[in-house]
Image (cartoon, grey):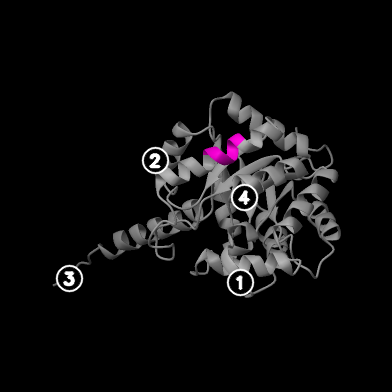
Amino acid sequence: MPNPWTGVGNPYTREEVRGRLMDTIAKKKAIIAAGAGTGISAKFIEKGGADLLIIYNSGRFRMSGHGSTAGLMAYGDANAVALEIGEYEVLPVVNEVPVICGVHGSDPRRRIWHHLLKVKDMGFSGINNFPTHSIVDGNFRQILEETGMGFEKEVEMVRIAHKMELFSIVYVATAEEGVLMAEAGADAIISHVGTTVGGSIGVKGASCSMEEAIERTQSIIVACKKVNPDLFFLAHGGPINTPDDVSQVLAATEAQGFVGASSLERMGVEASLTELTERFKSLGINGD
């Protein structure tokens, strides 16, 4: 049930969000979490029945026609952008679906506990670790870790969020990262297998095959279940793009749902606007 002082909708407590997701699973339905970079996206994703809405700073870039990876770059203040989208665009128009705030937990300029208090006070019902350094690898990842801006900062953020009774749904790229998040008190684990393919600004080739995506997703689930069997497990990215792709992953793993940002928001806009414009342009006029 929603908190009595809000009348309806956000903020929900951690247990209220968990209860809603458990109800979805009890109905044998997949949990669908969707990224929303604009109020209009949020309004109609909610109408479509999504279980969670997640605000990413990358949503602003995505809906401006740029690749989602721009959200990982120094093109703006990720934490400020996510709060702004939530406060002025999404939270005012969402009636009932829990809204999750993307938080850049490794931002060295912020006391993360203080920022999470702002997130909670604004009316978000939980947090997500985005931008996340889990999807950064190689020499740059090593530099981030060695200079105090690594994945452990995201784990600490989740540990603090758990103490604050904020629901946390987090990205991990490996089973080892998943275990760290499970131990920190995360509520839901998302296996991130790479940038989403397809569309006008998605990557051209998947970062892994569907078989590899399934294998990695299941390995994360198996490892995390040993820490906490009550976690929720979702899949995201790479070749997992369409409903058919998601169905394949759900059938081959113990995943209970899917997180779609580009897959829902951007792909939906690209396809529908192109088709609608083409229909308008097919119209003729009278005259000799």
Q: Which mark is residue 73?
A: 1
Which residue, given by chain and number where applicable, does mark 2 sit on?
Answer: 244
Q: Quadrant of residue 220?
A: top right
Magenta portion: prevailing SS class: helix
Under circle 4, the secondary element is: strand
Labels 1 and 2 touching (C-beta < 8 A) = no
Label 4 is placed on what type of residue?
Val
Which residue, given by chain and number where applicable, does mark 4 sit on?
Answer: 172
Q: Is residue 147 above or below residue 181?
A: below
Residue located 41% across and 43% down the image: 211
The total number of labels drawn is 4
Q: Is residue 132 visible?
A: no
In front: mark 1 or mark 4?
A: 4
Point out the stretch of residues depicted in magenta: 218-222
Under circle 2, the secondary element is: helix
Q: Is residue 281 visible?
A: yes
Please indicate whether residue 2 sits to the left or right of residue 283 in the image.
right
Label 1 is placed on what type of residue?
Met
Q: CA distance from mark 3 to mark 4?
A: 61 Å
Q: Looking at the image, tell me whether mark 3 or mark 1 is earlier in sequence order.
A: 1
* Label 4 packing within 10 angstroms: few (<14), some (14-19), many (20+): many
Q: CA distance from mark 1 to mark 2?
A: 31 Å
Q: Is residue 288 above or below residue 34?
A: below
The spot of residue 283 in percent (x, y) is 25, 62
* Label 3 packing within 10 angstroms: few (<14), some (14-19), many (20+): few
Q: Which mark is residue 101?
A: none
Q: CA distance from mark 4 to mark 2?
A: 23 Å
Please indicate whether residue 100 sits to the left or right of residue 244 in the image.
right
Q: Looking at the image, tell me whether mark 1 or mark 2 is earlier in sequence order.
A: 1
The spot of residue 122 in percent (x, y) is 79, 55
